[in-house]
């Protein structure tokens, strides 16, 4: 059996993804993670702190998966197109869950800077990922925007069609 903190984070991933952040209560997380209330508060001071920890863990997991998926490619064009293939893989693995960061962003108030900062850092790291591959800033930003819109559109329509189109566009850009 996993440690209490891991069970809490795993349950948060499941519940935040399926019910949303605002519709998921701490008591439900405690109950479904099979931990004591004191154990929850030993690891997290609040639901907001749990959300930050969840997003930080998700960031690490997501980028580790992206790098593992794309590092097999050696040429630039294949590496970038492979990043879009990674989205198809994630859609298959996670049933078109979409972006955990944007899902949470849609639910938090605009003055929640603690969670917003983590979301912004994730997106900045993604922009930097594409900038590290493509030196032309306009093209790297274009690829980033195609990537982001592909995530949202594929979630909305439960389809990888826009990702496939984006791969063709990227193929012409690079």
Image: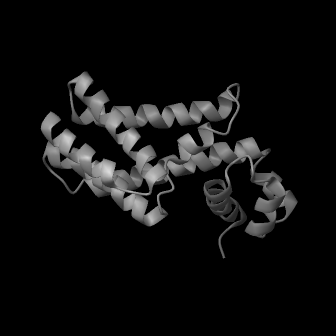
Percent coordinates x, y for residue 70 in the rendering: 26, 52
Comparing 125 with 78, the one in front is 78
| Quadrant housing the N terminus | bottom right
Q: Quadrant of residue 169?
A: top left
In the rendered structure, the answer to whether residue 135 lies left or right of residue 68 reads left
Q: Quadrant of residue 136?
A: top left
Q: Is residue 99 above or below residue 115?
A: below
Residue extending furthest toward the bottom: 1
| Quadrant housing the C terminus | top left
Percent coordinates x, y for residue 65 in the rendering: 39, 56
Comparing 28 with 34, the one in front is 28
In the rendered structure, the answer to whether residue 40 lies left or right of residue 93 reads right
| Residue 174 visible, this angle | no
Q: Is residue 49 above or below residue 25?
A: above
| Residue 64 visible, this angle | yes
Percent coordinates x, y for residue 46 in the rendering: 79, 44
Q: How many marks?
A: 0
Percent coordinates x, y for residue 145 in the rendering: 35, 33
Q: Quadrant of residue 5?
A: bottom right
* Residue occupying the point 23% across, 46% down: 167
Colour scheme used in the picture?
one colour
Comparing 36 with 140, the one in front is 140
Q: Is residue 92 above or below residue 84?
A: below
In the rendered structure, the answer to whether residue 115 lies left or right of residue 98 reads right
* Residue occupying the point 37% across, 44% down: 150
* Residue occupying the point 57% across, 35% down: 118
* Residue occupying the point 74% across, 67% down: 33
């Amino acid at each position: 059996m996993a440690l209490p903190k891991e069970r809490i984070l795993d349950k948060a991933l499941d519940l935040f993804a399926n019910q949303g952040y605002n519709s998921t209560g701490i008591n439900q997380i405690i109950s479904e993670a099979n931990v004591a209330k004191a154990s929850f508060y030993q690891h997290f001071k609040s639901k907001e702190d749990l959300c930050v920890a969840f997003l930080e863990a998700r960031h690490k997991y997501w980028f580790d998966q992206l790098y593992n998926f794309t590092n097999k490619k050696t040429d630039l064009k294949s590496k970038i197109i492979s990043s879009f293939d990674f989205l198809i893989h994630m859609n298959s693995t996670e049933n078109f869950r979409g972006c955990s960061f944007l899902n949470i962003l849609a639910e938090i108030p605009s003055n929640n800077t603690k969670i917003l900062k983590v979301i912004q850092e994730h997106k900045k790291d993604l922009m930097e990922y594409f900038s590290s591959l493509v030196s032309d800033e306009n093209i790297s930003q274009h690829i980033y925007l195609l990537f982001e819109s592909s995530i949202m559109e594929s979630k909305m329509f439960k389809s990888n069609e826009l990702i496939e189109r984006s791969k063709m566009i990227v193929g012409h850009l690079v």
